[in-house]
Amino acid sequence: MNQQGEGGRQDLRVLLQFCRADRRYEPLAALRVRYVVEGLTDDQPRAVEHSVLWYTEGKGEEDMGVHFFERLTERASLPPEAAAGTFTTLLPPSPLSYEGVIVKIRWCARVRLFFSGGRDFVSEYVFEMGRIPPARPPRAGDA
Amino acid sequence: MKLPRFFAKKRGHRRTGSQVWGSFGDGLFHAVLLGAGVVFGGLLASGVAVPEWRINHDFLPTSCTVVAKGLERHVTLSAPGRAEPTWQPCLRVRYEVAGIRRESWTRPSAGAATADRTLALTRLSSWRLGEQLPGWYDPSDVSRVVLERGYNWWMWLLALLLPGALLAFGGAGVVRSVRRWGKSEERRAAPSRLSGILDPLAGGPAQAPDHPGVPAGDDQVNSPGTQLRYRLPIESPENWTLLGFGLFAVLWNAILILLAVGAGLDLLGGRTDWLLIGLLVPFACVGVAGIVVFVRGLVLATAVGTTQLEISAHPLRPGGTYDVLLAQGGVGRFASLEATLELEEQATFRQGTDTRTEKLTVWRQPLQAWQDLQVTAGQRFEGRAVVSLPANAMHSFASEHNYVRWSIVVRGAPAGWPSFTRVFPVVVFPGVDGEGTPPSGRLSEAAP
């Protein structure tokens, strides 16, 4: 879990719950995420974004591919009126999660809350797609 | 007001620039280009396009009589205290506007300005006093008359092309920056109908249909093999290096020859420029070294003979098995020739103002090795191997800065020549269930 936002929101939390407890998914499987927003103060969100995406990590610059994205702006679908929400998508066939040495591919679901003045708060939960074992550099005698 | 920070923390250990400031800088840069396009386009339109268009559409026809002629002298200062005159033939013509006789000076375009006064006089003599010429006058300023109409297409092209490019590039950049401003990175990265138009260079390498992040691999299937289905293309970065050495050798030695000819002519004229001759010696050494390096590279690249690799199917799938044919041309003995299947990671990153690329082989599987081969002219060596991909193999991956690449690597040790490595990239698609379940059957072919 990774949560970050701009100052003064220490109490704010967005908790995500996946339809599979181990957060391991096969390609083309259905992904259902339920989230709950806790610790909201008087400053109420004016928009919420849901996204499912992959990003690269490691030595290189970060690349990103957004598979699913939706933005909610209707008051009825925003906290505090709707303090919980769900979103569902069918995962694509690729890229699979990969734990390489200098290139890593991670899948995650994000919920981003937007407040007045352009401030935002994002909560990110990583999940696995596929079952690729971690890579390691070959030893001298491997070849 | 709290300004955004210049630096934000990236995943990992490196700090990257603030996206807000980055977008602001990008928008400002494109706004400057757009502004330059507007100003430049406005100047060209008001100075060239609009006057020419008015002459062709608004000016009214009349008949002009040449009543006087002369040369107009323009003086420009090319250097302090040095004036250079140019001469422009001019005609004074008489014409009628609504029954009223008028006279005006006009510059015929056939008598363009020249620095040669004699040439200008010759041009001027082509018009005779009393000669009748067709003309067109400006109805809003009847003292203005021209003797030719038509369009200067070169000027129009210049007027449209340069500001047009600035307007298109700057405008697209400004629209892109405005569309991105205040949006989350997910919203910006989500594909939209306009993203391809506004940012045609973004998006990274071509991807396989319905397989995000997997390279298309079209190059691997556009060449049929002689015995197996496809002949794989060779990846040859050393050929570009060789081309670079060749270009350097040609350019350097061309400059050297020019300098040497100059020095030789000086010597023949009885003058000796010792500084030039002193400079020629180290220049000649570098030139000779450039030729030697290029010729050596060329000999090494061509003397060993070509390596060809054919494969029974493509793209590959985890758990699949594929036949491979290795063919080695050339003449001579090879101490060894081996083929391996390799998985390589490649990451591109910025370090200061440099862009660096790091590669790392993370998996290697020997396919086949041959020892002590004798290759004769007209009969290439052919060897068979089988590629078996692990069922849980990672698929090929390509994004803008990160790659996971599969390739079949051929390493040879020809007798009397340095060892060589030749790389044949292949594309591995993901397995059906995410672990790489092999497709049914063995994806291999028997030789015909």
Image (cartoon, coloured by chain):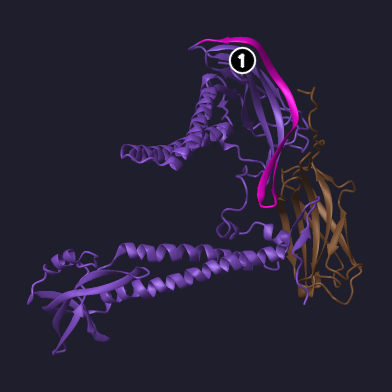
Chain colours: A brown, B purple
Disc 1 chain ID: B
Q: Is residue A22 left or right of residue A66?
A: right
Q: Secondary structure at mark 1?
A: strand
Decide whether residue B351 is among the magenta residues: yes
Residue B175 can be seen, yes or no: no
Which residue corresponds to the image point at 68% horizontal and 20% vertical from the top-left?
B386
Residue A128 can be seen, yes or no: yes
Residue B179 in the image: above or below residue B313: below
Q: Position of residue A6 (x, y in %)?
A: 83, 68
Q: Is residue B389 left or right of residue B445?
A: right
Nearest the viewer among B106 and A45 is B106
Q: Outermost residue, left direction?
A: B130
Figure quadrant of the N terminus of chain B: bottom right
Residue A100 in the image: above or below residue B85: above
Dividing the picture into quadrants, the one containing residue A140 is: top right
Please tell me how crowded label 1 is: few (under 14), some (14-19), or many (20+) other residues with Cα within 10 Å.
Answer: some
Figure quadrant of the C terminus of chain B: top right
**Residue interval drawn in magenta:** B347-376
Q: Position of residue B45 (x, y in %)?
A: 38, 72
Circle 1 is placed at which residue position? B383
Q: Main secondary structure of the magenta part?
A: strand
Which residue corresponds to the image point at 76% horizontal and 37% vertical from the top-left?
B433
Residue A143 in the image: above or below residue B94: above
Q: Is residue B168 left or right of residue B88?
A: right
Q: Position of residue B443 (x, y in %)?
A: 66, 25
Q: Position of residue B172 (x, y in %)?
A: 55, 64
Dividing the picture into quadrants, the one containing residue B387 is: top right
Nearest the viewer among B393 and B309 is B309
Q: Amino acid at mark 1?
A: Gly
